[in-house]
Structures are given as C-alpha cells and as structure tokens.
C-alpha cells in the first residue's frame, strides 16, 4: 500500500485525492467521484478537484504518491508511440 | 815425319802453340761464354717458366672471372626474379587494399543509405502519428460536452485498475 497523507475530516481519517479533469466538476460530480474512489481504495476520501484542459478528457488522480492517469491525453500519447513504432 | 814433309820440331812447336792457345781460349773464352750462355739459358728458362706460370695464372683468372660473371649473372637473375615477385606482391596488395577500401566505402554508403532510409521512415511514422493524434484531439475537443466528459470519466474509472508510482 502506498504512503498516503491523512486528515481528520468528517470526524474520521479521510484520504485526500487530487483529481484533475479537463472540464470543471460540479458538486454532484465530486460526490459521485468520491463514492467511486471510496470503492476503489476502500477508504473515506476527500476530492480536491483541479482543472487542466490539456488532458482533453478522462481524469488524473493522485492518491498519496500514487498516480492514476486515465486521461485522454495519456491514451493519445500511448497511441502516438504505438503508431510511431508501427512496422519497426 | 820427314817422309811426309813434316818437321818434328816445327810440329811440336805448333802443337804446343796450339795447345797453349786452346788452353788460353778454353780458360778465357769458352768458360765465360759457356757461363754466359748458361746464365742466359737459365734466364730464358725462368722467363718461360714465369710466362707459363703467368699463362696458367691467366687461365685460372679467366676461369675465376667466368665463374664470377656466371655467379653475378645468377645473382642478377635471382634479384630480378625477387624484384618481380615483390612487385607482383605489392601490386596484389595494392589491388586488395583498393578493393577493401572500395568495399568499405560501398558498405559505408549502403549503411548511410539504410540509416537515412530508416530515419525518413521514422520521421514519416512520427509525422503520421502526430497528424492522427492532432486530428483525434481536435475531434475529441469538438465533440466533448459535459455528458460525454462524465461518460469518459466513468469508463476511465472502470478501466483504471492500474496504479502507477509517481
């Protein structure tokens, strides 16, 4: 399990997750994302939303020192590398 | 003696005179002449011997000269043959070096050509990939609205089972 930082929100220790998206998240989105991440990490989380249009779509999430890069930018870069390597 | 018309006293006198003359001639004439003749004969003999020795020496020298000439000729032939062999070897070596150099140049040119070909292909692949990605990016940006954005996040959450270290 990676090192994570905890804080005392909601009267219990919650996990801070920095989530970057291309479009701004409204409160409903944040609540939905929180529930999704709580399922993934099995822990109460607090979403810190940031906007970065350069990722195009999807999201990037930083949990402690772990990174989930599920952005369209990342997929396109992977696709770019695959295309550049094609036929080698 | 008188019967044959000879006077004994005259005869004896003439005989003595003859013998004295003969003795004188023998002592003062014959011996020196003989000695001189012997010396001359010896000188001639020695001269002839020297001449013979010289002739033999000359013959030996001629043989030696001939032998030296033959040896020199053989050595000359050998040197010429050796020089020819060395010249052939040098020619062959130069030919091989030229061939190797030419092959090196050809190999280098082919390698350079292959490298340039690969580079062009790689550039084309990169350019093609860039065009595809830019086009995809443009299209995605154009069609991306809030609903589709939410859908993308949902799909990404489903797929993102992999965590990566920073």
Image: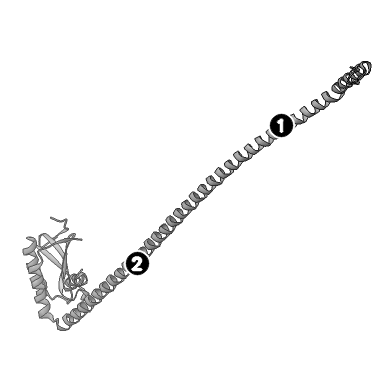
Is B154 left, or right, of A56 in this rendering? Answer: left
| Furthest residue in direction bottom, as rendered | B142
* Vertical comparison of B102 with B127: above or below: above
Q: What subunit carries mark 2?
A: B
Q: Position of residue B32 (x, y in %)?
A: 83, 25
The x, y position of residue B45, in whole percent, is: 71, 31
Mark 2 vs mark 1: which is more N-terminal?
A: 1
Front residue of B55/B143: it is B55
Where residue B134 appears, as percent x and y from the top left, is 22, 79
**Whether labels 2 and 1 share one chain:** yes
Asked which quadrant contains residue A60, the reply is bottom left
Residue B113 lies in quadrant: bottom left
At label 2, counting other C-alpha atoms closer than 10 Å, the crowd grade (few under 14, some 14-19, many 20 or more) is few
B58 versus A13 height, above or below: above
Q: Which quadrant would residue B159 be assigned to in this image?
A: bottom left
Q: Secondary structure at mark 1?
A: helix
Q: Nearer the viewer, residue B106 or B39?
A: B39
Q: Quadrant of the N terminus of chain B?
A: top right
Can the viewer see residue B124 in this picture? Answer: yes
Label 2, label 1: how far apart the Cα atoms are: 88 Å
Residue at the spot x=82%, y=27% of the render? B33
Residue B41 point in image, percent of width and height:
75, 30
The residue singled out by tag 1 in the image is B45
């Amino acid at each position: 399990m990676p090192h994570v930082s905890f804080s005392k929100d909601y009267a219990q220790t919650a996990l801070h997750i920095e989530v970057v998206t291309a479009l701004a998240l409204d409160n409903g989105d944040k609540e939905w994302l929180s529930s999704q991440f709580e399922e993934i990490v099995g822990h109460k989380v607090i979403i810190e939303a940031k906007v970065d249009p350069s990722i195009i779509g999807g999201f990037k999430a930083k949990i402690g020192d772990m990174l989930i890069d599920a952005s369209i930018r990342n997929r396109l870069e992977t696709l770019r590398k695959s295309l550049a390597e094609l036929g080698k | 003696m008188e019967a044959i018309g000879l006077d004994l006293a005259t005869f004896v006198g003439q005989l003595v005179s003859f013998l004295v003359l003969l003795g004188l001639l023998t002592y003062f004439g014959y011996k020196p002449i003989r000695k001189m003749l012997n010396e001359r004969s010896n000188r001639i003999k020695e001269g002839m011997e020297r001449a013979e020795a010289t002739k033999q020496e000359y013959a030996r020298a001629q043989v030696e000269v001939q032998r030296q000439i033959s040896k020199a000729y053989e050595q000359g032939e050998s040197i010429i043959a050796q020089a020819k062999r060395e010249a052939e070897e040098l020619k062959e070596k130069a030919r091989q070096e030229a061939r190797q150099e030419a092959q090196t140049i050809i190999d280098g040119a082919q390698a350079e050509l292959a490298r340039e070909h690969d580079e062009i292909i790689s550039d084309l692949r990169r350019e093609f990939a860039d065009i595809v990605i830019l086009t995809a990016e443009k299209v995605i940006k154009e069609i991306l609205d809030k609903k589709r954005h939410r859908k993308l996040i949902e799909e990404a959450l489903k797929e993102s089972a992999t965590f990566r270290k920073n």
